[in-house]
Amino acid sequence: MFRLMLASHPRIGIPPETGFILWLWWRWRTLSIMAADYERLVDDFLAQETAPDLALEKSELLEAFAQRGPRTFVDAMEVFYETYLGAVFPGKPRWGDKTTWYIDYIETLTELFPGAKFIHLIRDGRDVLCSYRNTGFLPGRVSQVALTWRTRVRKGERVARRLGEARWMNLRYEDLVQAPEPELTRVCEFLDETFHPDMLDFWRDNQARTLEPARHMAWKGRTVSPADPASVGRWRRELEAREVARFEALAGETLRRWGYDRSDEGPGPARRVVGRASGAVFRAYWGVKLGTWPWRLRARRWWEGRGS
């Protein structure tokens, strides 16, 4: 929803969720980009699972690369985004990206794009759990979602302190759906843009142009309707009391810090101790996983292409 709101601004275009920047960075970051590399780079982009959502043809990408002649990784990424803008949002000068798991690699992104601005959209983690379960493919275990949510929110807090208000903005989902115009006005001020009422009609644009890929509509169906606060606090209806208690034992302090009411039965001392211990173990696991992921990806790609 928020991506579509921004993409409805007359000066901003944002593609569907992709994540291709990091996938390509892990493969290309130590290499200089030469003209002889363009086709292989485009092929790597098109090989990503999410690439079809941008509906870009190899021929138009190669033509764009030939015209722009990028020599750095960041310049090459801009060619992908600007080609998408030209095809889907002609005339718009600014591009962005919305990919949830980018928060895990935010240090890399801030270094790659030193002039970029970041908006961290935060939602009540218990509602996030409900939303995840509705997809049928995202994690649905209380402990996993609670610890992942807490870890990512805290990471955003740390990066926000480092980057400052000029480059980082926090936005609560609940505030956005309950008061979209003032919140979007605040977003536009942060981006040095002027609020435009078309941002409130994002859903009409999506209805008319299918800006959200059809394969995602089973769990993103709300993007063809106006912003609706009905989903706020859905955890009170959908989660069992023991699930709420478990979530709050693991992430209750982070919930409180962001203004989310706790349930009437808060976790007792024993649950709080368990929550802190579980969090420490999870952070250690997460740190190892994120630290080794690029190398595991490279090893897998080398293995797959060893005979070529």
Image: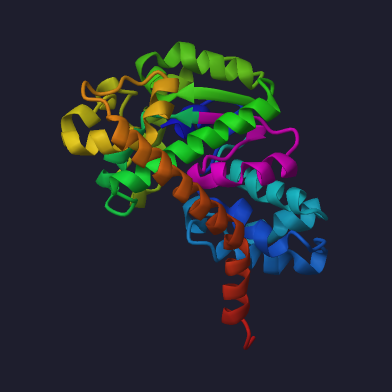
- Does any portion of residue 213 appear in the rendered image? yes
Q: Would residue 265 appear left or right of 107 to someone viewing this image? A: left
Q: Residue 231, percent across and down?
A: 27, 27
User: Taking 37 as reference, is 112 above or below it?
Assistant: above
Q: Would residue 96 appear left or right of 171 to someone viewing this image? A: right
User: Taking 251 as reference, is 198 above or below it?
Assistant: above
Locate the N terminus by quadrant. Answer: top left
**Residue at 21% over, 24% down:** 265
**Residue at 47% over, 52% down:** 53
User: Taking 34 as reference, is 64 above or below it?
Assistant: above
Q: Would residue 278 appear left or right of 167 to someone viewing this image? A: left
Which of the colour schemes (rainbow, by chain, secondary structure, one colour) is used?
rainbow
**Residue at 77% over, 58% down:** 66
Q: Residue 178, percent across and down?
A: 35, 16
Q: Nearer the viewer, residue 162 or 56?
A: 162
Q: Quadrant of residue 240?
A: top left
Q: Quadrant of residue 10?
A: top right
Q: Residue 92, percent across and down?
A: 63, 32
Q: Nearer the viewer, residue 253 or 225?
A: 253
**Residue at 36% over, 21% down:** 260
Q: Which residues are magenta?
A: 92-120
- Does any portion of residue 217 appear in the rendered image? no
Locate the C terminus by quadrant. Answer: bottom right
Q: Would residue 97 appear left or right of 164 to someone viewing this image? A: left
